[in-house]
Amino acid sequence: TFVRCQTELNKIQKTSQSMDEDSNESESENCQLDEDARSVEKDQENNKIQDFGEESEAEKSPDENFNNRSSNKKRKSQSSYLSQSKKRLKRRILDENIDNESDNEEEIALCLAPKKCKNLSNKDDRLKSIENKMDDFNQCMKKMSHSMRQMASYSNKITSHNLDIYRDPNSQENFTDKVDHNGTNLVIIVGRDFGDFARKVMRVLYSEEERKTHILPPGRPHLSRKPLDSNRFALLNDAVRVKYRLSKHLYDDFFKYHLRPNLSDFLVEERRRESNKIVRNQAKSAVSQIATQSQPGEE
DNA sequence: GAAACGACCGATGGCTCATG
DNA sequence: CATGAGCCATCGGTCGTTTC
């Protein structure tokens, strides 16, 4: 909100003022960078707030170019800020590199006297230290990618669970809590989400053979596989719709974009499971055969 | 802890259909 | 008739969970 922006701006102004007062040159570059960041932030905040104020005045003001020019100036000054920051950052990185290398006395010697680089043991040390750093870096990257995947999967789950867009709050529909198939109420089947639920219902409605040899209704004439029985498939759709309280007129989209891809993949996997199992077993038996053949040779 | 299993995702190819 | 868009089944690979 605007009020919150103002309070944040005040905070930033206060901190930057205190930083301005402390103009000691010996201050670390780190603080300098923080200050730069704050300055840029402040500048941006100023721009935002100015824009906010100008929004209403812009229409009244006859000289729009003036505003544009002033904003251009600000952009220019901001870019100069950024370029300065970049220079400082560059310098800081250089300094840090030197600092890190200075940790080791031998490395200091290497820095000061490059001729000694010819020494092979020193080279090995440096290579080892680089390798160690690379390992650390790789570990960090692994951790990062892992957490990113977790985040991605979490956000995915949220969207897949958020079915509100397929529900009509104005609808007066009374959802039944029973969809019967041969005496089995499909609605009471428990699944962790709509996909899991639908897969379980598929297992109830269709035999393994049917799941392996058919595709989703309505099917296509050019496809070799026949579609699953559409009456039972209608039961599945009813069960999903009733279970998750989805509107009739919105269900088509839900099916098209969420359920169908899910179930289509499910049928493919049903076919693949057995072949995968056979491949695994073949590989296993081949490995055990090789092991038994190599044993007498060793003795 | 490793193997097995299930679910998910992106890429691909074949097909239909609308459009110019 | 060529072309592009859209649909859908399929495949290969990866990841998370379950089982042993």
Image (cartoon, coloured by chain):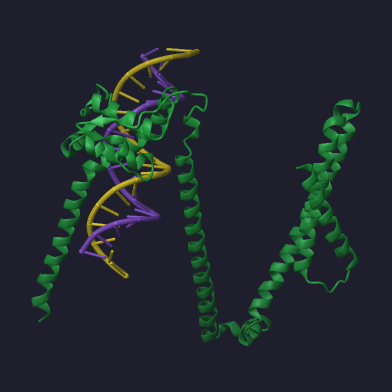
Chain colours: A green, B yellow, C purple
Q: Is A69 situated left or right of A82 in this image?
A: right
Quadrant of res C2: top left
| Quarter of the N terminus of chain A within the rendering | top right
Q: Residue at coordinates 44% horizontally, 22% vertically from top-left? A: A249
Identify which residue is drawn at 55% across, 84% down. A122
A215 horizontally vs A96: left or right: left
Query: Residue at position x 84%, y 53% from top?
Result: A10
The image shows residue B2 at horizontal and vertical percentages of 27, 66
- Image location of residue A14, percent across then percent down: 86, 59
> Vertically, is B4 above or below A227?
below
Q: Position of residue A257 (x, y in %)?
A: 42, 32
Q: Nearer the viewer, residue A38 or C12?
A: A38
Please identify the quarter of the rendering in which residue A260 is found: top left
Q: Nearer the viewer, residue A28 or A105?
A: A28
Residue B8, compared with residue A54, is above or below; it is below
Residue C4 position in % (x across, y down): 46, 24
The image quadrant of residue A23 is bottom right
Q: Would you say B12 lies left or right of A24 here?
A: left
